[in-house]
Image: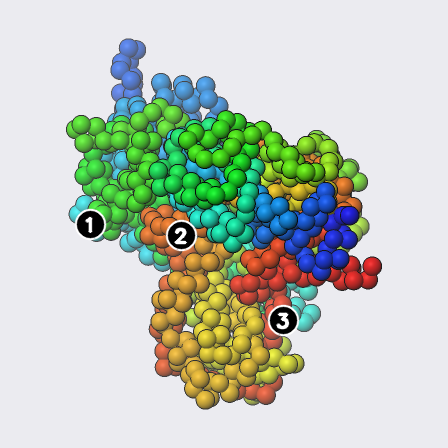
Amino acid sequence: MNGLSTISDAKSRDSLTIAGERVVCDQRGVLFFPDISLLAVSDLHLEKGSSFARRGAFLPPYDTAATLARLQQVVADHDPRVVVSLGDSFHDGAGAERLPGMFRQQVEALAAGRDWFWIAGNHDPDAPAGLPGESVRELQIGALSFRHEPSATVVEGEIAGHLHPCARIVQRGRSVRRRCFASDGHRIIMPAFGSFTGSLNVLDRAYTAMFRWERFFAYMLGRDRVFPIARTLLRPG
Amino acid sequence: MPPPFLKWFAERGWSPRAHQLGLLAQAQAGKSVLLIAPTGAGKTLAGFLPSLTALAQRPRRKAGEAYRGVHTLYISPLKALAVDIERNLGKPVSEMALPVAIETRTGDTPTHKRQRQKLVPPDILLTTPEQLALLLASSDARRFFEDLRYVVLDELHSLVTSKRGHLLALGLARLRKYVPDLQLIGLSATVAEPDDLRRWLVGQNPPGDMAELITVAGGAKPYITILESEERVPWAGHSARYAIPEVYQAIKQHQTTLLFVNTRSQAEMLFQELWRVNEDSLPIALHHGSLDVAQRRRVEKAMETNSLRAIVATSTLDLGIDWGDVDLVVHVGAPKGASRLAQRIGRSNHRMDEPSRAILVPANRFEVLECRAALEANYLGAQDTPPLVDGALDVLAQHVLGCACSAPFDTDELFEEIRAAAPYAGLDRDTFVRVIDFVATGGYSLRSYERYARIRQTREGKWRVTHPRIAQQYRLNVGTIVEAPYLNLRYVRSGKGASARGGPVLGKIEEGFLEQIAPGETFLFAGKVLRLEGIRETEAFVSNATGQDARIPVYAGGKFPLSTYLAEQVRGMLADPERWQALPEQVSDWLRIQRDKSVLPPRESLLVETFPRGNRFYMVAYPFEGRLAHQTLGMLLTRRLERAGADPLGFSATDYSLAVWGLKDMGQLFKAGRPTLGDLFDEDMLGDDLDAWLADSYLLKRTFRNCAIIAGLIERRHPGKEKSGRQVTVSADLIYDVLRSHEPDHILLQATRADAAAGLLDVRRLGEMLSRIRGRIMHRDLQQISPLAVPIMLEIGKERVNGDAGETLLSEAADLIEEAMGEN
C-alpha cells in the first residue's frame, strides 16, 4: 500500500490510498475522500488583503471573494457531507471579525447541511467568531488524522497543511513551478488554497524528515488534472 | 572669473575653454544650461565653475552665524561616479585653497555622517537620485535646501530615459518650489534630441520653456575598423569565438584594451576564451555588475594604476568614469546603437584631441552588416539615443507619498508643481487624483480600506500621513531600481551540497538563471567554471569545477535591441549592392546568393518568404526592428494564423527577422488570400489581439511586480528578511491575477500596461513598422530555405510560444514516470 502501487493499480493519476482510505487529489487544490464524503481544504488565509492593509500595504481587497468563489465551486462539485478546513483559515486572529457580511453569509450557505470543521492554525488559533461549524485542534476519523502543522517525522495517515508545498521541474530548459500535494503514500501535506498565499518548495529543509523520500511524489496542480512527479525530477527554488 | 581661478589656470599653462567660459557666463546671467560635450572635454570642471566661483566670492561664515544650507547639489547615476568626482574636484579646490566643503552622500554613507550632514551641510553635496528623494521626504527638507543655488546633473542622457529620471524630475520640481530661481546645469553626451533635455532641465510653466544650450563639437574622429578574420564568420550565434586569436593579437599590440560586450554571459565567455589562448599570461580582468563589489573595486584600482593589459566589461563601464590610459576599445558583438558605440569608443584615449581607436568584432553575418552600418553612422555623427517617455505613474505614487512624509500637501498645489516636471507635463488631473487615492487607500473601487488610510485629508483639505510608521516604510521603499531576485553565490568545497556553510561570496546571480540549472551542472561566473552544489534560501553554493566544460547559459540575444536608426542603415545597405564592397567577401557572397535564389529585402518594404522544410511549413519575415518588437509581432502573428487555420506551432525572433512555422502551407494560404499578407500584418493587431495576449503574458506579470514595488503596494525583498520562508511572502503574480479579474482598470494595471508597451514589447516601434509597410509587403513563395533565412532557422528550437507550454512540460515529466512504471 503505497503511492507507487496505487498509481499503477488504479490507472488513475490523481488518486491514492492513505491509511486504507481512498483519496482524490483535485487539481484545484482540495482533497476529496469519496468513501466518507469528506472534503479537505487547507490554508484559506481569508482576509489576508485586509490584514496587510492594516499595516499600510494595500493588497487588492478581493482575495476573500476569489478564495470563497473557488471554494464554493469545489464544494458544489463534490457535494461533501463533511468539510474540514485545515487551519490558517483566516490570515490573522481578527480576520473572522473583519469578514464582511456578504462573505459571512456565503460561508453559512456553504456549511448548511454539512458537518463543517475549523481546525486551529498558527495564524488563527481561536475559533472563528460567529461562523457555523465546530472548532477543533485536531480531527481523527478512522485511521486518518487531520491537523494544521504536519508532524516532524514520518507518520501514517496524517493530512496536514501549513507549509504551502510547491514543486518545480525543469524540462527542456524551461522551469515550471506549481503548488502541489506532497505525499509518500503514508501522509499528505496539502497545498495552500488562499488566493494570495505563497508557497515553499518541497525540497526545502522543512520537509526533510517528514517523508519516505524513495516513495515521494509531488502531485503538481495543472489546469485540468494533477501531475504526479517523482522526487528525482524535482528541483529546488 | 575670480583671481584665484585665473591664477590656477595660468600656473598650469592652461586657459579656460570656450564652453567653460560660456557656461559660466550663462549661469551668472541666472540661466539653466545644458552642456553637450564628448568625453575628455573638461565637462565636469565646466559644470562646477559657476558654483566654485560663487562659493569663492561668498563671505566667510562667521562664528555664530545662522545655519547655511547646501549651495550646490551634484547628482549622478552611479555611486562610483560621485566618489570619483569628489576626488577630481577636490584637487583644484585644494590647489586654489577655496573655502569649499565637498562631501558625498550615498547608500554607503554611514549614519553618523548623514546626521552630521543634516546639521552642518557641506557646500557641495555629491549624491544620487535616490538620496535626493530621501532628503526631500524628511520634515526639515525645506530648511536643508533653501540656500540651494545650483544643481549639477551628470550623465544626464542616461538618467532621463529611465524611471530614475522620472523620480529625479519630480524631486527637482520640489526643489524649484523651495527655491524658485534655482539653476540647473545638465552635462550630457551627444543625444538625438537636445531640446528634450533642455525642457527637462527647467520648469514647464509655461510649457515648452528650455534651458540654454552649449554644444562642444566632437574631437578627433575615431579610427574604427571591423575585425577581418581568416575564419568563417558564423551564420548565427553571439559568441564570436572564431575571432579570439585575432582579438588576442590586438590586445598584445596595445597598451591597455577595453573589451565591451552586451551581456554578462558574453563577458564570461569572452574572458574564459581569452585566458585559454593567453600564452603570455597578460593581466586580463573581468568587470560586470553581478560580481562582488570588492572584486570590482580591485579591478577598478588595477585599471587606475595601469597594471592591466585588458579588461572585459559590460555596460557597468559605459558611464564617464575615468580609468587609466586605454588605447584600444574592442567591441565584441554588434553595438546595437550608434550612440552607444560612440560612447563606448569614447572610453579610449580620454583626451578629446586624439583619435580613439576601436575594433568591432561581429559575432555573425547580420552583425557584420550592423557593425558596418554603425561604423558609417559614427563617422557621420548620427545619434539614436532613445526618445523620452511620459513619466510613470508608479514613480509618481512613490513621490506623492514622499511629499506627504515631508509636509502636508494640497492637491491643487502639488498638481501644479508636478506638471512643471517635464515627464509629467501631460498629466491630467483625474489621473493625478487617482494616484493620490492609490497612495491613500490602494485606489480600489471596493472602498474597504478607508480606515487603514496611509494619508488622509485634514479639515483644511491637506493630505498628511496618518502615522510615523508610514514614513519609515517609505524610506525602506524609496527608489525605482527593482532588482530581479538575486541569490548570493558562495564558494564551498565540492560535494557539500545544500548543507554547505560559509565560504566567500563570489557575487550575485539571477534566480531565474539558476532555475535552469540542476545541482551538479556547471556554468561560468567570475571567469571560473563553477558547479552548482545546492541552493538554500537566498544562497547558492558552488564549487570549483576546473577542467570541465561549463554549461553556458542559453543566450537569448543582445540585451539592447537594435536601434531604429541602425535598422534603417542595415536595410539601406542590403538594398544597395554598391555598398557591399565594404563587406567581407563571404558576407557579400551570401547576399548575392540571396538575390539569385529569392530577393533582397527592399529598403521601405517588408520581405516575407514562405517555404517547406521537413514536414513543416515556414514563414520568415525581415522587418529589422529589433528583437523586442519581433517577439511581440511573433506572438500576434501566431494568434492570427491560428484563427486563419494555419496551425502555427511556434515562432522565433532575432534582431533582424522572425520565423513562424506550422503544419499548413502558409505560402498557399497567402496566395489564396486566406488571409492576405496585408490582412495578416494589418495594424489592427495592436488592438484586441494585443490586449488579449498581454493579459496572460508572463512579461506583464514581471512588469507588474516592478510597478507594485515602486508604487509601494508590495515591499521590497530586504536581505536577511527572507529567511522566514517563502510561503509567508505575497506573490506579485497572485496579486496580479486577482487584480486583473476584479479590477482590470486599476491604476497600477494601467501603469503596468504603459510600461510593457514602451519597454518589453516595443509596441510603438512595431506600430511604426506596420504603418510603414502597409501595402508594401513582398511575398516570395520558395521551394526551399533562402540564404537570408538560415540565421533565424538556426535559432529555432530555443523558444516555444504555446500558451499551454507549462502544462505540456508537466505532462511530459509525468509521462516519464508512467513509462518507468509500465516497465515495472
The x, y position of residue B50, in whole percent, is 30, 35
Q: Sort mark 1 into few (<14), some (14-19) or many (20+) by Cα contacts within 10 Å.
A: some
Confirm or deny contact between disc 2 and disc 1 (CB under 8 A). no
Chain of the residue displaying label 2: B
Label 2 or label 1, whichever lies nearer to me, is 2
Q: Which one is in front in this view, the residue at disc 1 or the one at disc 3? A: 3
Which residue is pictured at 62% across the width and 36% down the height? A146
Locate the N terminus of chain B and report the quarter of the image it occupies. Answer: top left
CA gap between label 1 and label 3 equals 51 Å
Tell which of B580 and B385 is nearer to you.
B385
Residue B434, placed above or below residue B328: above
Q: Is residue B634 visible?
A: yes
Q: Which mark is residue B794?
A: 3
On the rendered structure, is B603 left or right of A36? left
User: Residue A203, can we see it?
Assistant: no
Q: Amino acid at mark 3?
A: Leu
Q: Residue at x 20, y 41 (%)?
A: B416
Instruction: Describe residue B61's horizontal placement relative to residue B278 as left or right.
Output: left
Going 39% across and 35% down the picture, which residue do you hit?
A: A99
SS at badge 2: helix
Q: Position of residue B358 (x, y in %)?
A: 55, 58
Question: What's the amino acid at mark 2?
Answer: Arg
Q: Which residue is mark 1?
A: B207
- Residue B807, image quadrant: bottom right
Q: In terms of sequence position, does the residue under pointer 3 or pointer 2 come before the other?
A: 2
